[in-house]
């Protein structure tokens, strides 16, 4: 774990290949580092010794008068070897090699030479062919992705660069908080397993999402996955024949047999998601709410139809609708009109306003016989989504001790109401099925842990 | 078809039970009608003869000095029978009975009496227990749902009221255009089959979405489905045992065997969607783009990873990646750097800007050997999503003759770019898998038609 300390928590950084041209990657990375609030020292390096963003550049890393923990290299591939040699002599501990032009375009020998130099000097290397690293605890945005990233508790490890940058933008727009984003690139040295070993001890990360196309050392990955005591959600692409061929041409990965991957992930306690949206939907719940006690849940709704859809999804995903005890049903009946339903799904009917939501949710939260709660709301002409969300928050804050997931179906006001709920750590979903799928994934993760002694030990 | 003319295209409307209290449903409906641009005559009716929104109410429909095509009734259930009798005597042709308190709460006899009166006078009835009707060609919003609805080409038929209202809000926020929204309620007289028969001749409707919990007359529905020469997407809930029980308590529907439903829908040429988002994703494509020529498609991307995800989804959904002819590959190679891929998925690489997208899309559009196109874009630091979307529009407008689907992955600017594309009838998707699933659904619809002589005749 200490091995990657210099990568994630460097005391000093040199950015080699910092251009004064704002269109260049080296400039972008340097700008992102100094504007992200990073508290260590940062030194730009370029051959001309230019002034960039008010910083005087050094013409070589060897001229920097202080120790450097991390060097970030963004220069043409042909010059990387010499610069890395210099880094080694300087005593640099970790490298991020942004530069492309190695194994991914067939330059296998160049990549091997690069790796052998890092090994000679005992340096750890991320890359080559990466977009960098974001790590919220160090306030370090050493990427050429977006400048502002919403900090949070999900770590995202990605083999695809374009996908990683685009998803940082996407997650930030949706206010999904990230603790770390790690671009894996060619994985010449550091791979997903190494990153997982580090992240597993990171208190700021509560869940991990990995996008991967191929795995070099399956046994090593399984070992690391088994040791991570937090949910890991994997999107493994190249599932299909055409996808595998495309992955091979993209990152040179051998996709391997898809069934083997699924089995290996499951055995290691990791979850496999169908797509990116699902992965983030799942992880959002896992970082915001405690694990469910059981596979039982209660659906609370103001609309019968949306309740039926959620009930259908529960059966499909392997969740059970709790049987509501009679005394609790009697209490619930007092809150709803006669044509409501105190059975699960609990249907408060379209007449339900914030009082009815508050009172019924309070009953469910206080009752130890009730485990997880899926709360649904259809926008109506006579209720205000923001008032409903306020009443949910009020009831939730009485005892935030069991998983609550929310889906508001409607217009702009529902979006705003859901944003407020997420700010208070109640995960929200566009569709009832997404909420159900997320709760089921959380249950599956817990079950994997219980079933597998090598994981839970 | 003429039978429902008075419902969808009334020359005059009476709203019975118009309150002056803005919190009441009668007020909401009346307000929505007069503010929606409806060009026929509207008469409010209430016992006190109050002035509502500047209109003097009649104390009875019988006092209205002109003919009434459609009466909308929103009064307590106990008074509905007498009022409907009056409507019959007045010569009203169609009714929308908003009032609840009939079969859905066990008042079967009251509903049967209601139905028999409508039959006595030869009136057609929507309801009881509905939220009303929206019909864009008549500029008629006779619902107590949102005042503003984005007009378009998707008709939405819903058995659930709360879901229907919430989805009108949702669709409008997403600028998904609706040609009609029909609340089915208890379906005492008019059912989905009747509505489909009317809609099938409606030139403003290009696709239909139906949310249903149960079917009374399966044979009638299948017949109507088979006659509709446009895509119909069905969300049939109550798939599971718990869901079916919930549906039964919600609308008194007997959900029936789920496998039978799936088979019947397929045989009738209808599509079954897994959830509401998927249904709208599919329908959006079907109203915006021409049907695909074949199951072959081309993926055009600036990111390898997202291309692999789309390729995986294609195999899963039964789409084939076209083999790009060599001469076309040679043309494409001129547009991309050496490490790009001219094979399918076509990877322009992260260096691709608007010129590269324009030139490659132009080649694909112009080439008759290429059928459908799935265009993907990952937001990067060096490209502007809005410029990319402009170049897509420019190329698309050269010959908008084959299906194009777009997914931009990124932040706010991507959202804005996708909004612009949709305004120009290019459907966009949050995730590559959603685009693929939509194209596959369109192919499936076409295949159902070809395979079934009773449909295509």
Image (cartoon, coloured by chain):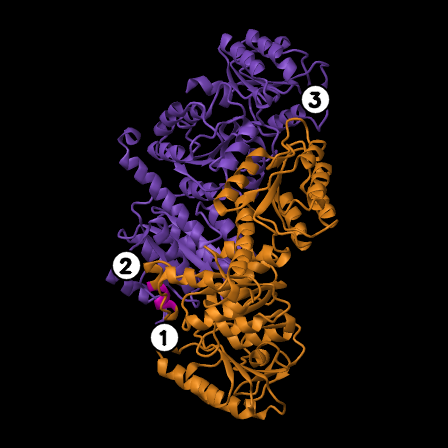
Chain colours: A orange, B purple
Q: Are marks 2 and 3 on the same chain?
A: yes
Give the mark, 2 or 3, whose residue is nearer the N terminus. 3
Magenta stretch encompasses residue A246:
yes
**Labels 3 & 1 near each other (Cβ < 8 A):** no
Q: Is residue B239 magenta?
A: no
Q: Label 1: how many residues lie within 10 Å, few (<14), some (14-19) or many (20+)?
A: some
Instruction: Determine which of the numbered discs, if any, sits on residue A214 in the image.
Output: none
Could you tell me how far apart the alpha carbons at marks 3 and 1 are, in whole angstroms?
73 Å
Q: Which residue is mark 1?
A: A105
* Magenta part of the chain: A245-250
Q: Which residue is mark 3?
A: B19
Quadrant of the frame with the C terminus of chain A? bottom right
Decide if residue A290 is on the left or right side of residue B151: right
Q: Which chain contains the residue that carries disc 3?
A: B
Q: Secondary structure at mark 1?
A: helix
Decide: is A265 above or below A34: above
Closest to the observer, A89 or A5? A5
Residue position marked by numbered label 2 in the rendering: B324
Alpha carbon separation for disc pair 2 and 3: 65 Å
In the displayed structure, A6 sits above or below B388; it is below
Compared across the picture, whether A396 is left or right of A70 comes to: right
């Amino acid at each position: 774990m200490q091995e990657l300390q210099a990568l994630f928590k460097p005391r000093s950084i040199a950015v080699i290949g910092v251009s004064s041209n704002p269109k260049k990657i080296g400039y972008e990375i340097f700008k992102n580092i100094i504007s992200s609030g990073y508290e260590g020292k940062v030194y730009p390096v370029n051959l001309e010794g230019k002034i960039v963003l008010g910083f005087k550049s050094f013409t070589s890393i060897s001229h920097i008068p202080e120790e450097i923990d991390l060097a970030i290299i963004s220069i043409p591939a042909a010059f990387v070897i010499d610069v890395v040699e210099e880094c080694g002599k300087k005593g640099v501990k970790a490298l991020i090699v942004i530069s492309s032009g190695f194994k991914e375009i067939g330059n296998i020998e160049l990549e091997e030479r690069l790796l052998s130099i890092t090994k000679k000097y005992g340096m750890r290397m991320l890359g080559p062919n990466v977009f960098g690293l974001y790590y919220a605890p160090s306030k370090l945005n050493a990427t050429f992705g977006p400048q502002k990233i919403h900090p949070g508790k999900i770590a995202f490890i990605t083999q695809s660069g374009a996908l990683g940058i685009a998803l940082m933008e996407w997650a930030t727009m949706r206010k999904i908080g990230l603790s770390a984003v790690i671009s894996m690139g060619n994985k010449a040295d550091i791979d997903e397993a190494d990153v997982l070993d580090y992240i597993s001890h990171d208190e700021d990360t509560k869940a991990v999402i990995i996008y991967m196309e191929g795995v070099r050392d399956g046994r090593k990955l399984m070992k690391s996955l088994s040791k991570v005591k937090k949910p890991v959600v994997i999107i493994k692409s190249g599932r299909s024949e055409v996808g595998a061929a495309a992955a091979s041409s993209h990152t040179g990965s051998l996709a391997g047999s898809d069934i083997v991957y699924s089995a290996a992930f499951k055995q290691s306690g990791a979850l496999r998601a169908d797509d990116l949206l699902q992965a983030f939907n799942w992880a959002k719940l896992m970082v915001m709410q405690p694990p469910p006690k059981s596979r039982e849940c209660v659906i609370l709704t103001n609309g019968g139809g949306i309740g039926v859809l959620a009930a259908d999804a529960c059966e499909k995903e392997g969740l059970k609708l709790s049987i509501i005890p009679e005394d609790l049903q009697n209490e619930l009946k007092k809150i709803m009109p006669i044509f409501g339903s105190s059975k699960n799904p609990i249907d408060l009917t379209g007449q339900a306003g914030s009082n009815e939501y508050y009172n019924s949710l309070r009953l469910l939260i206080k009752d130890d016989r009730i485990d997880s709660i899926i709360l649904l709301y259809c926008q109506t002409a006579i209720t205000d989504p923001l008032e409903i969300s306020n009443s949910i928050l009020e009831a939730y804050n009485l005892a935030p001790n069991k998983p609550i997931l929310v889906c508001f179906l409607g217009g702009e006001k529902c979006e705003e109401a859901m944003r407020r709920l997420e700010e208070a750590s109640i995960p929200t979903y566009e569709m009832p099925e997404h909420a159900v799928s997320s709760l089921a994934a959380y249950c599956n993760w817990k079950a994997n842990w219980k079933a597998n002694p090598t994981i839970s030990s």
